[in-house]
Image (spheres, rainbow, N blue to C red):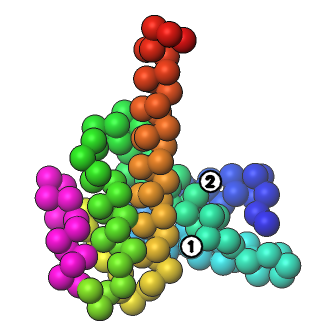
Amino acid sequence: MITKELRQAMIEKANAIIEENQFIAEELIVDGIIDLLDETAAFDKLSAPTALDLIAAERERHVTVEGWTKEGDAQHVNGELARAAAAYAIPYEYHSERRQLWPKNWDRQMWKPTPENRIKELVKAGALIAAEIDRLNNLEQKEVKNDPAN
């Protein structure tokens, strides 16, 4: 299992790569984070990066690289995060269905399928699901705080 310290070091290394190479496309950055996780696993033969490690790294990239915030996620009240996750999660053979699932009000440039790397697509889907869960949890917490009965 990747420790908190090691995860933080990997994030810092990814951020350094990003700062040095602002012109790098998003996909190269994601590849770099996944490569960092793979390198870490090489040092720790007992533990390869888990799906949760990969998803957490992608979600962290959403925040640190893309600038996504919980306030921004809160604006997606029509299932956009879940639809985008579903679009990435569906296998490439269902290409037309995948594109139909992509939220209509989202820029098509945000849709970056990687059919040659199934794990990367599932990691993207997982990170978007995590964002939707966080959004719903935050909404519930606000409702509880605003409930006069509490």
Residue 106 drawn at (x, y percent): 18, 55
Which segment is the magenta one? 95-109
Residue 90 lies left or right of residue 37; in this view the side is left
- Residue 129: in magenta span: no
Return the disc, 2 or 1, that comes first in the chain's sequence: 2
For this rendering, which residue is in front, 30 or 100? 100
Q: On screen, 62 above or below 113?
A: above
For this rendering, which residue is in front, 31 or 150? 150
Residue at 34% x, 37% y: name it: 74
State the quadrant of the N terminus: bottom right
Residue 135 drawn at (x, y percent): 42, 41
**Few, some or many residues within 10 Å of mark 1 (<14, 14–19, 20+):** many
Which residue is disc 2 drawn over? Answer: 12
Residue at 25% x, 62% y: name it: 110
User: Is residue 135 visible in the rendered structure shown here?
Assistant: yes
Residue at 49% x, 21% y: name it: 144
- Residue 97: in magenta span: yes
- Helix, strand or loop status at disc 2: helix
Which amino acid is tagged 1?
Answer: Ile
For this rendering, which residue is in front, 67 or 79? 79
Question: Magenta residues: mostly which secondary structure?
Answer: helix
Residue 63 lies left or right of residue 15; in this view the side is left
Residue 52 drawn at (x, y percent): 62, 64
Q: On screen, 78 above or below 51?
A: above
Which amino acid is tagged 2?
Answer: Glu
Residue 61 drawn at (x, y percent): 48, 55
- Badge number at residue 34: 1
